[in-house]
Image: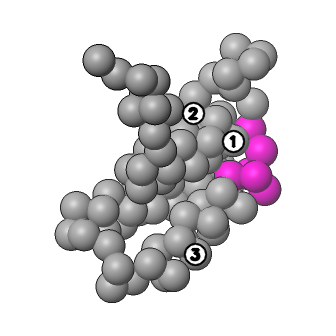
Amino acid sequence: MSDGKEAGRVDFYTFCMGLGSSALVHLGDVPHPDAGDARTSLLMAQQTIDILGMLQEKTRGNLSEDESKLLEHLLLDLRLRYVQKSSGREG
């Protein structure tokens, strides 16, 4: 029987995906969880993407292959979305 600790456990994957979700909210690609509507804040999106980039740099050589690929693909997707939003070219 679970004591509840497993449900609240945060590992590298959930940490990265949480930051990625936050960036998607700031890019306006996902509705804001409190307001329910899409709001864009490119500054906040950029800061969150930069945090993920810093995490990638600081953990280089210390991640499993799967963790490294997750972070690489997440950053690639978020950076592409950011460039599209900031240049006015969406989709």
Q: Residue at x 75, y 19 (%)?
A: 34
Residue 7 drawn at (x, y percent): 43, 28
In the picture, the disc for residue 8 is none
- In the picture as drawn, the residue positioned furthest to the top comes out as 36
Name the residue beneath numbered marker 2: 29
- Does residue 71 appear in the picture of this structure? yes
Three-letter amino acid code at the position of disc 1: His
Three-letter amino acid code at the position of disc 3: Met
Name the residue beneath numbered marker 3: 54
Q: Is residue 42 magenta?
A: yes
Mark 1 or 3, nearer chain start = 1
Q: CA distance from mark 2 to mark 3?
A: 23 Å
Judged from the image, the secondary structure of the residue bearing numbered disc 2 is loop
The front one of 10 and 69 is: 10
Range drawn in magenta: 40-45
Mark 2 or 3, nearer chain start = 2
Callout 3 crowding tier (Cα within 10 Å): few <14, some 14–19, many ≥20: few
Judged from the image, the secondary structure of the residue bearing numbered disc 3 is helix
- In the picture as drawn, the residue positioned furthest to the left comes out as 65
* On-image quarter of the N terminus: top left
Name the residue beneath numbered marker 1: 26
